Image (cartoon, helix red, strand yellow):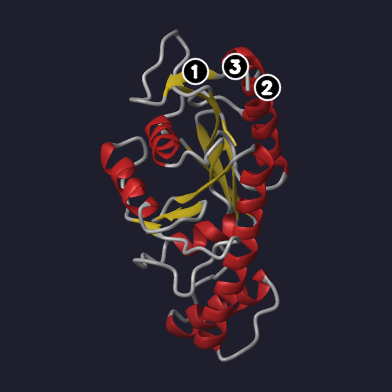
Amino acid sequence: MDELTAKKQVVEAGLELVEKGLIARTWGNVSCRVGEDGFVITPSGKAYDGLSASDIVRCKTEDASYTGEIKPSSEKKVHALIYRARPDAGFVIHTHQKLASAVSVLDMAAIPGGLSPDGQPVPLAEYGLPGTKKLSANVAGALEKTGGKTLIMARHGTVCFGDCREEAFKNALALEKTAEAFIAELFGKAGGRRYSSEKDLFAYYCEKASARYPGVPQNLGSSRRDGNGFILTLGGEALAYP
């Protein structure tokens, strides 16, 4: 694939991440392999709905280095190591998809039974701060444990890839469905009841929290960005925080 076509695919994939609920704000990142020694990746800190091909940054597969004034995603080294380790990787997406990210907080060495849409194990990469060598090393270690194309990063999110954009998204969406099945299994064991929706999880949380902390409101509220701060709405009251 030529570089311009790859950059356009990355822009379109960023919009698809938002559309399919696999990401929020500027979090996550997308890349596409270009030739034998490079890949193009989303820039750091820019909203997906405002990206153009000129914003997408080319990096070297060997060391994730780049040239130019636009800074690539801080996870560029994770993408680079996947392209080096897996010749079958042509497109990589790092998501913060809701249910698989919920599984990521369990801190398991591996997900029992696996969650992979292709029947391969889905390993859990140990925690590392975003953009650090530790995170890259942990992802590399997790890759060695599977022949599949999905993995979960502890307390962070997922990395899903494929030989093309379509396969990468197919794997991410399938992982979300199987993550829900895994959560349903845990819910059934913990609550002694059948899981049918996320509302069940919230109701179970409120029930247990109310029993343990009588009189404490269990409404988690909501928040929205306000300039450099945010507004928290809780119990009908809006509170501004810098």
Front tag of 1 and 3: 3
Q: Residue placed at 60% from the left, 44% from the top?
A: 23
Front tag of 2 and 3: 3
Above or below: residue 207 compared with residue 102:
below
Mark 2, other Cα within 10 Å: few <14 / some 14–19 / many ≥20: some
Q: Amino acid at mark 2?
A: Lys
Picture disc at residue 3: 3
Picture disc at residue 58: 1
Question: Between residues 203 and 63, which one lies in front from this camera angle?
Answer: 63
Q: Earlier in the sequence, mark 2 or mark 1?
A: 2
Q: Residue placed at 46% from the left, 54% from the top?
A: 151
Residue 140 image offset from top left, x and y in percent: 34, 46
Question: Between residues 228 and 94, which one lies in front from this camera angle?
Answer: 94
Q: Amino acid at mark 3?
A: Glu
Above or below: residue 43 compared with residue 123:
above
Where residue 198 sits, quadrant-wise, is bottom right
The secondary structure type at the circle numbered 1 is strand
**Quadrant location of the N terminus?**
top right
Picture disc at residue 8: 2
Judge left or right: residue 231 versus residue 69. Answer: right
| Outermost left residue | 134
Judge left or right: residue 223 versus residue 106. Answer: right
Question: Between residues 131 and 84, which one lies in front from this camera angle?
Answer: 84
User: Do residues under tags 1 and 3 come within 8 Å of each other at their CB atoms?
Assistant: yes
Q: CA distance from mark 2 to mark 1?
A: 13 Å
